[in-house]
Image (spheres, grey):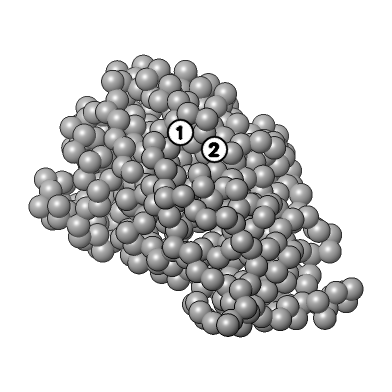
Amino acid sequence: MLFKDMDLHPSLLRSIADRGYTETTDVQDRTLAETLEGRDVAVQSQTGTGKTAAFLITLYENKLRGQAQKWRSALIIVPTRELAVQIEGEARLLNRHTSFHIGAFYGGVGYESQEAMLRQGTDIIIGTPGRLLDLAEKGLLKLKEVGYLVIDEADRLFDMGFLPDIKKLLQKMTPPRVRQSMLFSATLNRMSQRIAMEYMNDPVFIELTPENLTVDTVAQELYRVKSHIKPNLLLGILQKEKPANALIFVNMRHTAFKLAKKLDLNGFRCRYLSGDLPQVKRLKIMEEFMDGKFPFLVATDVAARGLHIDNLAMVINYDLPQDYENYVHRIGRTARAGKEGKAISFACEKFGEHLYPIETFLRQRIPEKTATMDMFATDRSLEYEGRPGRYDQGGQGDRGDRSGGRGGRGSSGDRSGRGDRSGHGGRAPKSGPGAAGSGPGPEPSAKPSAAPPHRQATHYGPSRKP
């Protein structure tokens, strides 16, 4: 459907046109059909499908049209500062021809400016749970005045331990029947469904199968390779493919640091992201990567949440994810909103066991290619072992931050995680599902229903040319 054909407020239609949006995506079609009628929704949708625009358009339209609810604020709860900043930016772009007051609220920064925004009046409030709860307990965030609620990336919020804070926030709000609520999650697991049923008003459940959103637009390749020569194959692929940029996923924090260092010493300008980097440093690295200031980024799954970059040439699964659904989230970043992309995966003896659950979830085999001897490049970083001073920039393993940096304390008195409880400025997330670098495990309840064709016996490493 074309946005111009929708019965939206003229000011909002102008903003949508200025933003460059012309045709709705699947998630926008199905979400807006319900939310513009005032119904609550629980939507299963991955990043890059247009879900942010779906809930922002709902909020703007309903606030512009609904005179009775116009004075009520909209609250958007997100897991990380980075995602809050991203949504705030998108909200401001869609606010070009309207006059809503928009603010983002998160830990790791002082309270003064955020408190001033609330005192002056904020229509669209975007924030992390800990900081929102702090502001509510100070009496500055009037939760009883919230008329519209969005819980974004709900599965990550729960994985990162925010469920108690979210429940406290919801319990301080008006009853579900007198507000409109929207929940978005990559997977509608049992926890997401429970929150929807308990704190929403008869929500409509909308599910879009992630494999259909991803497989059709991403060229996938799989190489079997021994762990100790994965760096050589990665270097060879980068030399051969020459991608304009690439996001490289690993499962462990220490792997992110070591691999980024190795790539940098081999001439590929690279940084790394892990959940235990200080919040300010993580945000700066993400912004610089999205701005194209360096072409290669190594990241863990949790650390990369909220990272969205247009025209990403390639995603490389240096380690196969331990959670098969994370495979979809990873490779979907190179095929955002219907664009084509390329994803290359390595199956080694350590993480190769995760291949079968991934292919079962996708209901297809990932096309397998043979890693021939000429595809392996020499690792020149070995020449620099033991030499200090070559690799000491922030986000690249500075000498006082060997494991990627410890989370710094938040601003004084910030009860939101002595940071923002997200592990991005306070204490690092606990180990277990969703912990940065630990590789979240699969949901026990999300069992694939069909298996891909049987694979032959596993063989790792290069194949010699005949």
Q: Is residue 199 left or right of residue 60?
A: right
Q: Report the residue marked by disc 2.
A: 442
Residue name at image x 22 percent, y 41 percent = 30
Residue name at image x 14 percent, y 55 percent = 2
Residue name at image x 31 percent, y 37 percent = 207
* Residue nearer the viewer, 225 or 143: 225
SS class, disc 2: loop
Mark number, residue 228: none
Q: Quadrant of the C terminus?
A: bottom right
Question: Residue 379 at x, y = what percent?
Answer: 73, 78
Question: Residue 463 at x, y = what percent?
Answer: 61, 73
The image shows residue 300, relative to residue 432, as above or below, that is below
Question: Residue 192 at x, y = what percent?
Answer: 44, 28
Rendering quarter of residue 114: top right
The residues bearing labels 2 and 1 have C-alpha atoms spaced at a distance of: 7 Å
| Labels 2 & 1 near each other (Cβ < 8 A) | yes
The answer to whether residue 416 of the structure is visible from this angle is: yes
The answer to whether residue 310 of the structure is visible from this angle is: no
Q: Report the residue marked by disc 1.
A: 446
Residue name at image x 15 percent, y 46 percent = 8
The image shows residue 89, relative to residue 384, as above or below, that is above
Q: Amino acid at mark 1?
A: Ala
Residue found at the far front of this picture: 466
Rendering quarter of residue 232: bottom right
Rendering quarter of residue 226: bottom right
SS class, disc 1: loop
Q: Amino acid at mark 2?
A: Pro
* Residue nearer the viewer, 293 or 227: 227
Badge 1: residue crowd in 10 Å (few <14, some 14–19, many ≥20): some
The image shows residue 13, relative to residue 134, as above or below, that is below
